[in-house]
Each structure stands twice: as C-alpha cells, then as structure tokens.
Image (tube, helix red, strand yellow):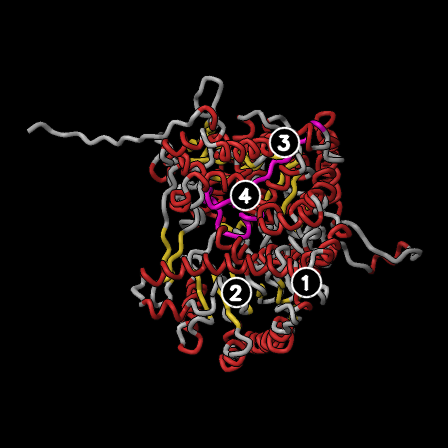
Amino acid sequence: MAKRTTFMLTVNPKIPERLSRLEELTNNLWYSWDRATRALFSRLDPRLWEMVGHNPKAFLRRVDESLLLAASEDPAFLSFYNSILSAYDSYHSATIHCSTVEGIEAHDQVAYFCFEFGFHESLPVYSGGLGILAGDHCKAASDICLPFVAVGLLYRQGYFTQKIDGQGNQLAAYCDSDFEDLPVTPVSRADGSDVRVQVKFPGRIVMAKIWQAQIGRVILYLLDTDLPENSQHDRLITHQLYGGDKTMRIEQEIILGIGGVAALKALGITPTIWHSNEGHAAFMMLARARELVQQGLDFASAMEAVAVNTVFTTHTAVPAGHDHFPEAMMHHYFESFYQELKISRETFMALGHTNDDHDFNMTALAIRLSRMHNGVSKIHGSVSARICRDLWPEIEAEENPVDHITNGVHIPTFLAQEWTDLFDRHMGPEWRNKLCEPEFWSRIDTIPDHIFWSVRQTLKSQMFYGIRARLTEQNIRNHGSDAHLERLLKLADPINPNVLTLGFARRFATYKRATLLFENLDWLRSILLDQERPVLLIFAGKAHPADHPGQDMIRRVNQVAAMPEFEGRILMVEGYDLRLARRLVAGVDVWLNNPIYPLEASGTSGMKAGINGTLNLSILDGWWGEGFNEKNGWGVKPVSEQLEPPLRDAEESRSFYEILQDQVIPLFYDHGKSGFSAEWVKMAKHSMATLLPRYGARRMVEEYIQKFYIPASQQGVRYTQDNFAVAQNIAAWKAKVRAAWGGGWIRPAGESPLASLYTSSLPSS
C-alpha cells in the first residue's frame, strides 16, 4: 500500500475589486476606536464575527467568498463601505485634519518603549492597565498628528484566557496566536526580505524580526525572536507576556531595550525624544550610551547626552513592582558592556543600585539615565518621590525632581456609541474637537433628562445581555442546572434594567482589595437583599497565575456569591477582557474602587466609567483623589496608613456600607413621576461634564508634549551641538564638583573664616 502524505491546505476568499480596501482596513487598528468599521465586518456575517472574537483580519481570512460577492453588489453595503473609507481617508490626510503640534519641530520624533500595548482584543499583546494606557497614548498621538513611533515585543502568547470552575478556581489557558490573523505585517526591505536585527547575548547572537502594526497615523514596531536561526531557548524569549522566571524577564527586557534601539537604527529612524514607559525598557538608555561611546565620547558625557532627552514614566506605587535583577545575573549579561562603555564593573553596577538593595534596580537605572521622570497621578507622583528618595539622598523626598502627569483614556475608544450619537444630535459634531475644553461640556445639561436616562438604561441592557451570555456558557461548562442559571440571572434582566448595579472589574491584586465589601456580611445582606430597593454587585477580573493570594480573592468572591441569600445578587463574570470592560464601564450604575491608599498609582477604569455617565464610588487614591469634587460621585477618605490592615479594612468597609446605604441607594431609587431619579441624572451629567474633558488621553499626551517632549527635544539639540560640547562640559563640571565636594566647608554668612575650623566637612557625593 502506497504511503500517503497529508498536506495542509489554506483557502482564502478572493476579495471583489469593489471591496478591495477591506484588507487595508483590517491592518490598521483605527478600527479599534472606529465602531463603524467593526460594524461593517459584522454586517457581512454576524456569527463568524463572534466566532473570531471581533478580529477583522481573522474574519476576512475566513468569510465565505459568496458573502463578499453579494456585498459587492449590495447598494446599501457599498454605501456604508464607502462612507467608512471616506472617514478613514479623511482621518489619515494630515493636510486636512492636522495642524503642526506647537513646539514640536519638523525634525522631531518621539520613540515610545513599553513592555505591552493594549489597543483591541484582536491584538493580544497586553495584560492590563499598563498596556491599555500605552495603547491610548499611541491613539492620542495619532489623533493630534504627533511624530511618534512605539516599540514593543510581539508575543506568541499574550495574556491568558480566564475560565472559572464550579469551585471558583481560576483556570488560565494560554493560546498561541497565528500572526497571519493579527493586524501586523513584517517590515521588509526593498528586495522583499524581512528586516532583522542582531542582539548580543553572552556567547551568542539572538536574531529578532521586526513587525509593524498601524495605529491610525502611528506605527508600532514589534520584535519577535521566534525564528529558525535562533536556539529553542531564544525562540521562546518573546513567546509569552510576563511568563517565565527572572532569566526570561531580563532577556525580554534586553530584546525590548537594546534590540529596540537597533531596530529603529535599522529602519533609519532617529528619535529626538525617547520615552521609557516603565523600567522594563531602561536598557534602551544603555544601548544609546554605548553608541555614543563608540562615536568617541567618554561614558560620563554619553550619559548626559542620553539622559537629557529621555523621559521615564513609572506606573507602580508598590516597591516590589519595580524590576530588579541580582548583580551576578547583570554581570553575566552585561560584562561586555563594561568594555564597550569603557567603565568598570563597579561603575556599571552603581547605575542600578539603591541604598537598601544590592540588586540592580531598573527604576534606578531609568532615573539615572533620564532627566524627566513622572508618576501617573498627583498622589502617585508624591509616592514615587518617596520610593525613589535614595537616589537623591541630599534632599527631602518631596523636593526631588519626580513630577506627575495624570493618566487619561482614549475617549473615542471607550465612549459608548450611544453617547456619541446623542452628542451629535444635541451638541453638534464639533464636540469631537472640544475634548479638552471643560467649559464646552456644560452643554451636557441641555440634554433632556429622560433622553439621558434612556441611554443609560440602554447601555445597562446591553451589558446584561453580554453578562448573561458569559454566565450561561460558564454554567453549562461547569454542569450547572437551568434552574440554578435562572436564579443567577434573575436581577440581570435586560428587559427590566431598573436594579441598582455596582461594578468592580480590574486586576485581582491584593492591594486592590476586591473582597473589601465582604468584611461584614450581615451589613452587606441588609444592603443587597432589600426587596424594595435591590442591588446587584458584579465582579470581573484576573489574577496573575503566580499570584495565589489574588486567586484566593476570586475564590472568595465565588464562595460568597454561592451563598443562598446572595445567589443572583453577586455575580463573578469570567474572561475579563477589553470587550467585557467596555460593556461594564458603560453599563453599571456605580463603579467601585477600594485600593489600599496610596498604592493605586492612577487607575483608569474609573475614568472610562465616568465619561459614560457611570458614577464612581472610590477610595480617594490615584486619579480619583484629584477628580472627585463632592458632586460627581462619592469619595471614601482613607484612614491612617499607620492602622493595622484588619482595622483599616474594617474602617474603610464601614464607610462604603454607610455611603451605599445612606446616599447611593436612596438617591438611585428616588423615582419621580418620570420613573427615574432626577437627582441621580443630575449627578451623572455632572460626572460626565467634569471628567470627560479632564481625563482624556489627548489632554495627557498634550501635557507630555508641553512638560517633557518639547524640553527634551530642545535640550537634546543643545547637548549634541559642536560634537556634544555641552554634554562634555556638564560631565566635566560634575566630575570636578564631586572631586572637590569632600573638601568643602559650610559657615554662616558673615562669620569669620576661622570659624569654619569648627564646622563639618560636606559629605562626598
């Protein structure tokens, strides 16, 4: 019998000429904030659209060709298609929509490095807040035509998909992405070959392929080591986001930082402003310093030239969240750098040392090799200054140069379509150009209350439909009965969405205290079980697979939700992702946030809720500490940080219970003749009017431009002129001061010089 050979055959549909630009639309993440584009694909085959997880590129590879042919002859579809192309072309035509960003010169280019980027669920190279923030930064840069490129890693496995079993255990499933299904394309040379860069590792060279993703007018370059010429170990470097041990982490950060600099050089991109979003990318600064030393500068001068146009943003208020590596590991990977930088091992290691830690700290490296540093809210700026106080031992923490720029969210992405349609009708299309003008948003008050409330209820109904679908799937998989499912879904009724609904959805880290409302179950029962004024509490979120306390919190939520009296009143929805997040922030009535103060660096989910008319009830930490004005939601003043954790939890949970019982519930259920609470609508309108213009990503990026990017560019020009003369002069001056510092004396003005004999010598720096 002849031996048979099995072949894989892929058949892609042929796209009709009339619809030829569909492929272009799938390769630009503009669709991540343009809902009409996503609706265009959904209209072709709604069932397939759901099956591919709302991924346009995957959809177009699988759609039935006959549907495309029919659509190419359908006048209604063609009209819709052409209107989208018109909007797309208009957006991308800089001469029509963009004016020069004031202060940014024609030669300027921002290079933005980050470990993860979250644009849409169709590109799963993100895990949570850091990635979504980075994605929103790119989108806002595109909106204002900022010359901007981003650099990251292309993970074969992004963050995990979450399932929750019948016992409340989180089950993490990782799936390899098929890059042909992702909105990315390889970067090619003129001859069609892929652009690759070499990154030197101990005893070997690791190759990295460069891919690109288009985000409106912005390009994100992604490095990938899964190449045949690499060893099996090295192919796995970019395999999984936040996977592996410290060895994998440092190797990923080397590829991102050092490989990222090499990638931009290979592409002929010469940034004038370098932005490291978190310390993961700080090796980028060492790579740049090495290039300058190879050009003839000494390391001290190279360090000045690198630092002066480098921006560093830190996103964590938890000291343990700052990456650090053992000195022996750093020596293993960077021994060759000592010679290339022409410095000693001790000088190199000192770049990452702090007073209380002998490990090499990436935040310390980032601060020493940058001149602009910031936290991501006013509170977090102060907290970061305290965390980094050892880097400026001569001054008080509050006097060190850690600044802050409060995060923002990309409004076109997270503002529900129903609101954009309503704003078009009542405020005119110009609202899109007024996103940073608070006085304009007072016009929200002119929207009739009943129409405003109708939109809120519509969004809640849509959320309930989505939640019911997920809980139904979860119940079937866990072998639950129909009767039990009916009990679970009794309040999540899209036909009658009149129940007060509270939402808590975010990463399940211990400091975020997802289970704070369970401190006093008797009190919680009295709040949730009122037959006249029912309350529904919805949870969603993932814990890192290595975070066992975080997973215990998920189990605790499920345990309490399974108590007979709480069934159907507390829901834990699995599979938290961007799509579910968009539903929740727009659909719930109240967004809860109860972190341990002051560990919430910023938090952006509450911003997304606020711009959609959802009211925040939160600890006054992160962004809410500056956003709350006593009329746009509710704030819980944190108790003393000196209290023991159990006492703190008891005190702050009591504040939540009291606010819910005395203010939130009575206000929501204070229905007038119209069937809704006019005062609730008034507060929701005020929330939108005060938060939308203050917490958009466009405002955030414009602050970066004015506060950091323009000074970085201008200083960079000064320091590089005349063969880096200023950088060399500054380095020489600092060396002279350090050398003489130990011989200095302090005496009161007007005192005899002899009195200095009795003073102390200044400490050496």
Which amino acid does the dot numbered 1 rest on?
Gly
Alpha carbon distance from label 2 to label 4: 24 Å
Magenta stretch contains residue 321: no
User: What kind of residue is marked 3?
Assistant: Ser
Give the residue at mark 4.
Answer: 35
- Check residue 625 in the rendering and tell me which mark sits there, or answer none: 1
Q: Residue furthest left?
A: 1
Q: Earlier in the sequence, mark 1 or mark 3?
A: 3
Q: Nearer the viewer, residue 98 or 547?
A: 98
Distance between the alpha carbons at the discs numbered 4 and 1? 32 Å
What segment carries the magenta color? 106-133
- Residue 125 magenta-highlighted: yes
- Disc 2 vs disc 1: Cβ atoms closer than 8 Å? no
Q: Amino acid at mark 4?
A: Arg
Whichever of labels 2 and 1 marks the residue nearer the N terminus, that label is 2
Q: Does label 3 or label 4 sit earlier along the sequence?
A: 4
Q: Position of residue 480 (x, y in %)?
A: 32, 66
The residue that mark 2 highlights is: 497
The secondary structure making up most of the magenta span is: loop
- Nearest the camera: 662 or 727? 662
Q: Which residue is mark 3?
A: 90
Residue 251 vertical position relative to residue 684 in the rendered view, above or below: above
Query: Distance between the Cα atoms at labels 3 and 2?
Result: 39 Å
Q: On screen, 280 above or below 753?
A: above
Left or right of residue 23, residue 614 in this image: right
SS of the residue under disc 4: helix
The CA span between labels 1 and 3 is: 39 Å
